[in-house]
Amino acid sequence: MKLKTLKMVLTKSAAIAAAAGMILTSAVPAQADTDGTIQSITADDGSSGITATVSGQEETVGDDSASGQPGTQETGEKTEDSAEEASGQQSADNAGEESGQQTSESTGQESGDKTADSAGKESGQKAAESKEEASVSVPYTAANTTDIYRMYNSTSGEHLYTSDTNERNVLLTNGWTYEGQGWTSPNKGVNNAQPVYRLYNPAEGGHLYTMDAHERDVLAGQYGWNYEGIGWYSDAEKSIPVYREFNPGASKNGHNFTASETEDRILVSQYHFNAEGIAWYAVPDPDPTVKSPVTIYKGTDFSAIYDFSYYWNHYTDVQQSVGRYDDAGTLKHFVETGLKEGRQAKESCDQTVYDDLKNKLYNPYPEATAVLDQIGHNLHVETVCLLSKLHEAMHHINVKVDMDELDLTSAEAKATYKEIEEWVQEHYGFHVTNLNIAQVKQKHGIIERENYNKPKSENSRQPGCPEEKVKAIEDALRHFQMI
């Protein structure tokens, strides 16, 4: 039978017993009606007279102890000292009542407090364990991360970022430049990764990337941008910040994104980009090896004759000039240096394909090259130009020819007329003419080229060169080791 918590109104006998310090326990047999309501309690000596009445709310013994509610209070105190009961009955009335209530309430409260403390500690410990278990992050690996490629269009000025290798390759065949790996992002669902949205502006032809759903909705709903879905994901643990800058001087495609703190600082401080803060977060690259090395350079696919790992590992000058995991720089080195020199860049390849690609870039006229290979390259080539009046020519180019530098003799090759004039001016302070220089040269037997501006009369007289100018010119000729 479930007992009910009793708030007891003690009789004078109970008060006397409480004052005497006698504790009644639940071991005392209780008399109850059929409905379980306790009406009287009989002491161990058989005497009765301690009565209780039921008041308050019903409580269940044992079932509520875990919740911190007081359990069933001891329903009485036992006393056996009849001598003290007879002698102090009247005077202990009030004291017994107060003491009984305090003892009962104190016992129940202490039991409830201990139960509540125990339950609270257990609940807190479980919550802490649950929180600790939820905060444990998954290590990043090549399987749960994605490389983000950085592309550049020199015509539009746009930087485009994509995790799609196929999109990267298609853009490369359409004139875009591959600038390497921009950063590494976590895959969907890894460590609570958050989405980064990709939008396209059909009016300007550029893209924007944002984690802000409100910015996405405003651009797509009010300004005509096309929402292209989730581009990649941001690290919720905020490992590596990716910065966002805007070029106010660009007519279009002014945004740039970079995981390089140095690039961000230079763009803002030196090129006057507006710093727009951290756009999202990347993760450390768990696998620095290049997963999908680029093979397309300036629209041409070299995969048939080029392998990134083979080329980088076989040439020390490549290792010294290009980073170990810089697939873009390694391909550029092969195309601009290795291919021109005829270096092997793959374990095996078709030599015909190799030659065709090489000729496409560096020998657009293979037939002419074949002829030169047969007859030799040490040929004297002369060019014949048809001179005509400028106003009669449909097309023309301007060419400046200094006649003083044509048909030079061995002596003249050491110094031109102009150089002799400047030397005399600098050292003697006066000007000499070309005629003066020619007269002094003739005096010393220096062969002059034929003068095509001959005088009409064979007997025409020419002024002689003053003596001081002769001396100055001779010093100049000695300076240039012409005499």
Image (spheres, rainbow, N blue to C red):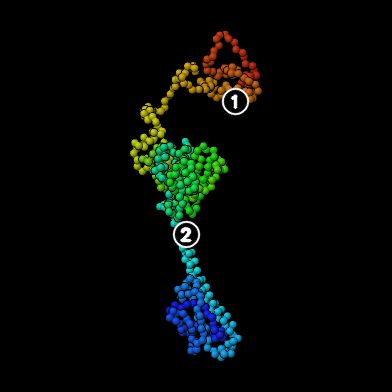
Residue 389 lies, in percent from the top left, at: 49, 16
Amino acid marked by disc 1 = His
Q: Is residue 8 above or below residue 262?
A: below
Residue 392 lies, in percent from the top left, at: 47, 16
- Relative to 108, 463 lies left or right: right
Q: Residues within 10 Å of mark 1 (few under 14, many from 20)?
A: few
Front position in the image: 431 or 255 = 255
Q: Exactly how many numbered labels are in the figure?
A: 2
Residue 479 numbered tag: 1
Front position in the image: 275 or 47 = 47
Q: Quadrant of residue 444?
A: top right
Q: Residue at x 52, y 73 (%)?
A: 113
Q: Residue at x 64, y 17 (%)?
A: 467
Residue 433 in view here: yes
Amino acid marked by disc 2 = Ser
Q: Secondary structure at mark 2?
A: helix
Quadrant occupied by the C terminus: top right
Provide the residue designation for mark 2.
135
Q: Secondary structure at mark 1?
A: helix
Distance from label 1 to label 2 (Cα)? 87 Å
